[in-house]
Image (spheres, rainbow, N blue to C red):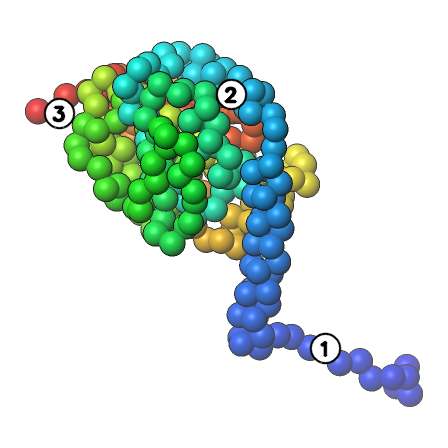
């Protein structure tokens, strides 16, 4: 009633909202940092290697041979690829190949394997010459570049007979939203929304873009990722 305690409603100011976002981002990054260190200590590399080989088999892509150049280009942080153990898994799985990791400047990673090299660059701007790679794995699409520009850059770096593999978090696709089947999917989407590094894409639209550059396309969903395969570059007159 009127004689009861008065209720007050409070809301965050613009400065308060910005501070809350910073605290939330730092909290998520703290969890992901623990995730990274846990994966670095993982001893199940054979299982990871088997999963990588299975991925190639699903996509109908022949595995790298002696002298193959395998490029993987990544965002600053990706919780769905066991970052950074994925690099070491590729190095372990294909020891006869040279693995080049294109990472954002400032990301510090150790080059403790003879066939593993880290280079500063971006997913839409790689420090590599035309026709450099036999294989190129793109991890997600950056927010600050269009899908067309990223695919064109991948196309530039790949050899004519090269193979493109795109892994994009399923929760960051139009086909997946807005439903989340698990708490893990919800948490992953929250991470990507907070980090603001990757864009939401349409798998069908990306396939249409790829069809302009490549003759053979295939796609599956694997371990929480939408995976697209492309090979057989088309010649543009």
Circle 2 SS class: helix
Q: Is residue 55 above or below residue 84?
A: above
Quick one: label 1, few (<14), some, or many (20+) residues within 10 Å? few
- The image shows residue 129 at horizontal and vertical percentages of 17, 35
- Residue at 56% from the left image edge and 20% from the top image edge: 46
Measured Cα–Cα span from mark 2 to mark 1: 55 Å
Q: Which mark is residue 9?
A: 1
Hey, which quadrant is residue 99 in on the image? top left
Q: Residue furthest left?
A: 237
Q: Is residue 196 visible?
A: yes
Hey, which quadrant is residue 75 in on the image? top left
Q: Which residue is mark 2?
A: 49
Circle 1 SS class: loop
- The image shows residue 202 at horizontal and vertical percentages of 42, 35
Q: Quadrant of the N terminus?
A: bottom right
Q: Which residue is mark 3?
A: 236
- The label nearer to you, 3 versus 1, is 3
- The label nearer to you, 2 versus 1, is 2
The number of callouts visible is: 3
**Is 233 on the left or on the right of 114, as rendered?**
left
Q: Earlier in the sequence, mark 2 or mark 3?
A: 2
Q: Earlier in the sequence, mark 2 or mark 1?
A: 1
Verify CB contact (< 8 Å) between mark 2 and mark 3: no
Q: Quadrant of the C terminus?
A: top left
Measured Cα–Cα span from mark 2 to mark 3: 36 Å
Q: Earlier in the sequence, mark 3 or mark 1?
A: 1
Quick one: label 3, few (<14), some, or many (20+) residues within 10 Å? few
54 or 120: which is nearer to us? 120
């Amino acid at each position: 009633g009127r004689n009861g305690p008065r209720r007050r409603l409070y809301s965050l100011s613009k400065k308060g909202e910005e501070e809350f976002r910073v605290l939330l981002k730092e909290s998520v990054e703290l969890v992901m940092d623990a995730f990274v260190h846990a994966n670095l200590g993982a001893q199940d590399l054979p299982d990871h290697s088997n999963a990588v080989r299975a991925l190639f088999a699903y996509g109908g892509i022949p595995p790298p041979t002696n002298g193959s150049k395998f490029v993987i280009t990544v965002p600053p942080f990706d919780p769905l690829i066991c970052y950074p153990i994925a690099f070491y898994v590729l190095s372990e799985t294909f020891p006869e190949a040279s693995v080049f990791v294109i990472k954002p400047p400032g990301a510090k990673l150790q080059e403790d394997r003879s066939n593993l090299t880290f280079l500063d660059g971006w997913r839409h701007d790689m420090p590599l010459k035309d026709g450099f790679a036999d294989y190129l794995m793109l991890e997600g699409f950056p927010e600050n570049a269009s899908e067309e520009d990223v695919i064109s850059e991948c196309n530039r770096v790949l050899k004519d007979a090269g193979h493109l593999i795109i892994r994009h978090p399923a929760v960051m696709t139009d086909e997946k939203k807005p439903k989340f089947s698990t708490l893990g999917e919800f948490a992953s989407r929250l991470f990507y929304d907070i980090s603001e590094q990757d864009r939401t894409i349409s798998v069908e639209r990306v396939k249409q873009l790829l069809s302009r550059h490549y003759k053979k396309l295939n796609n599956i969903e694997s371990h929480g990722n939408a995976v697209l395969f492309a090979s057989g570059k088309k010649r543009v007159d």
